[in-house]
Image (tube, rainbow, N blue to C red):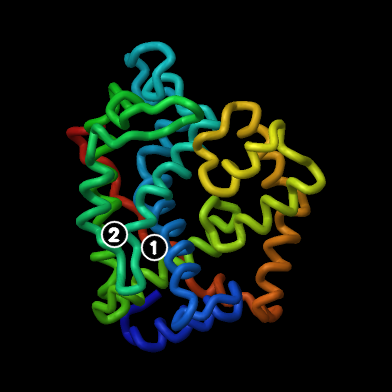
Amino acid sequence: MTTDDPQGLIKMMDDCLRRSFGIDPERDHDEVCALATTGYVVSCWRNTVVEDIHSGGFVPTARRGSYARDGIPDRDMLRLNVATWRQIRPHVHPEGIDVIAVRALLRDKHRPIVLGSNTFTCGELFAGTWTKLVWHLNEGAWLPLHLKDRFGGDEAATMRYYAVCGGSYASDWFGNPWWESAITASARQNPPPRADDLELALHAPNQLDDDAIGWLVSAKRSPLFNEAIHAWKAGRGVDATDLAPGLWFPSGVPELPERLR
């Protein structure tokens, strides 16, 4: 992607929202902001050193059982992504992303995270690796400010670019406009362990217990889940043209500096 024609790039991006996702950037502000939140959270949270911690062995000398040493279980990774999405969504607006507010949120060692029925602070969850993590999160929060130059300084267009990225890179994430339709369709064939679990799966899946999280993962893998996404888009007039491959995910955070490795 080049900066030679910002207006051409914006037009291609907005066409992608309409033709690939069935979302009108001039009218469907909630849907655009939801997808942009997904793209931004993937960029400023999920694809940072969080993924290295997830894999395990990031700090071999950390205490046994900690994320820093033993990694983040997949069930908790899903919950962490959801909890962070829910906290960042209020800071994503049609006019752009409030990166100052997001930066303060991500840097807060006392930010509460609900995992199942328990609440932890980020400092507790990432003990032994917080210094490295917070450096990366700080860099991630600023990414829209670097990216907006590609769009002639247009912060609203930068937000919409994150929406294209969210819809194409993480189409199965919680919070996307079609999430409720897709999960509900899967639940009709394979109901959750308890009736109340469906409501949590739709609106706050980070609060699901381990059994229900296992069900949710299975629901996302069901063919019905993807069929429901396609049906949601078809109901909004999506044609067969997929323009998303013409755009790619924004640059991620830089490597950790030598002093933090």
The amino acid pointed to by label 1 is: Pro
Quadrant (top left, top right, bottom left, bottom right) of the C terminus? top left
The image quadrant of residue 259 is top left
- Image point (28%, 72%), residue name: 148
Of the image marks 2 and 1, the number of the one nearer the N terminus:
2
Above or below, comparing residue 12 to residue 225 in the picture: below
Characterize the local packing of mark 2: few (<14), some (14-19) or many (20 or more) Cα atoms within 10 angstroms.
Answer: some
Distance Cα–Cα, label 2 vs label 1: 8 Å
Residue 83 x/y as whole percent: 43, 42
The residue shown at (51%, 35%) is: 207
Residue 239: x and y, percent?
69, 81
Q: Nearer the viewer, residue 116 or 63?
A: 116
Instruction: Say left or right for 206 vs 261.
Output: right
Q: Nearer the viewer, residue 63 or 163?
A: 163
Q: Name the residue under label 2.
A: 143
Image location of residue 26, percent across then percent down: 44, 83
Q: On residue 250, which mark appears?
A: 1
Near-viewer residue (56 or 206): 206
| Residue 66 in the image: above or below residue 158 | above
